[in-house]
Image (spheres, grey):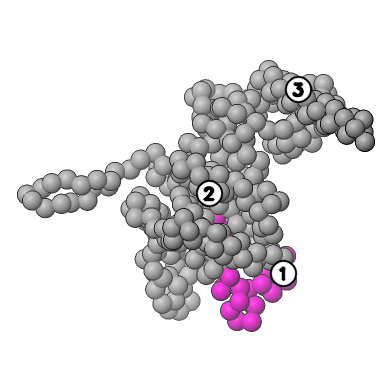
Amino acid sequence: GGYRNNEDKYQLQLEKCPRHTSLQDVSYFLVHLAAMQALPTTFELLRCERSKGGIGKGRRRIGAHGESKSSPEDFIPLEEQVESAIELIEQLPLLVFLASRGCMEHIKSVKKDFDNNNGELLRKLKNTNKKMLVILMISNYPWGARGGERDLPDLRREFKKVLNGFTDVPVTFVFYVETRNEKVVEFYDRLLSPESGINANIRIAKGLGLQVDGISKHNPWINYCVQMHLCQAIGVCSNILSQASSRPLLASEVGELCSALIGNLPSPAFEMDNFLSEIEALMSTNDNFTKWSTITSKNAPYIDVKKLKRHLSKTWWFAGAVAICIVAIIAAHITFN
């Protein structure tokens, strides 16, 4: 976005960037997934005001429940619901440019939905053994542009309190982070640590550019394909794939991710040779594990076994060094006492 001088008047010009395109592509996928699976789904641009009845300029619904205009005869066909949601998503670049409101207010509105009508929504989910998935595509802190440096501790505590209001509630929040601001990315990564004190069920996903750059740097043995990216956008392997873009994965995490992607495997911590040989056999014989790479722009297996071996040798060396240091410290402590 920028300004252009035209006959002494300033006009705002908006241009799409890769971040907008990535967000829109994931949103289109979610629209069609909801339609194909008949999943009751609401799409909302967080910075648009809701109209009466909840369906306004910034909100659309898709799924089995549909949406009635005034009577059952006026039921909106699924195709029209999809078209309406896509029209909404087309507004995304403008809303990203005007970003000011954080996602915390939206999370509060979800809590109100649960509190209304004496908890009818919560009872309905529990009685049908279903869960709600809330995907928040964000580029800023949860509180948006509110407050300055002095207000951060209070805002963090408020956000923690809001999220913990969903403890033991069948809701999963996916924070889909699309920004190059390292402090913002680090803030959401830290939500996964036990020290954060967050008890709600959360997942952290990241934009395609962040994932590709981070994984190629820290875990190049992963072929981060489009299929993996769409999975993390809906909360499948989100946390571990998100961490893979921020740091080298530990051996236990490698085993967890590989088992999630291709099936049960031996533990690399106890059966390293069997673990690697089974992966190598699957990658070389099963075409289902070969996908287009977003990094090399060529077909490649999910896992590059040679690179994985080098990766694991480094993690084992680090773990061994830490263990030796711990033993040395304990021995010294015993000697001096």
100 vs 5: above or below? below
Q: Tell me which residue sits at (66%, 72%) in the image.
A: 122
**Residue nearest the viewer, comparing 227 with 254:** 254
* Left or right: where 194 falls relative to 90: right
Q: Secondary structure at mark 2?
A: strand
Kindly tell me whether residue 45 is visible in this rendering: no
Q: What's the residue type where badge 1 is placed?
A: Lys
* Foreground label between 3 and 1: 3
Nearer the viewer's eye, disc 2 or disc 1? 2
Q: Give percent across and percent down for residue 254.
A: 72, 32
Which numbered tag is attached to residue 176?
A: 2
Marking on residue 317: 3
Query: Cα distance, mark 2 to mark 1?
Result: 26 Å
What kind of secondary structure does the magenta stretch mostly adopt? helix
Residue 336, compared with residue 49, is above or below; it is above
Q: Which residue is mark 1?
A: 126
Query: Is residue 98 in sight in this rendering?
Result: yes
Work out whether mark 2 precedes mark 1 in sequence or the reverse, and give the earlier one: 1
Residue 266, position in %: x, y?
A: 83, 31
Spatial CA distance of label 3 from label 1 is 47 Å
Find out whether the residues at labels 3 and 1 contact each other: C-beta distance under 8 Å: no
Cβ atoms under marks 2 and 1 closer than 8 Å: no
**Magenta segment:** 111-135
Residue 117 belongs to the span the image colors magenta: yes
Q: Residues within 10 Å of mark 2 (few under 14, many from 20)?
A: many
Residue 115 sits inside the magenta stretch = yes
Gap between marks 2 and 3 measured at Cα: 33 Å
**Where's residue 160, x and y in %?**
61, 61
- Looking at the image, is mark 3 or mark 1 earlier in the sequence? 1
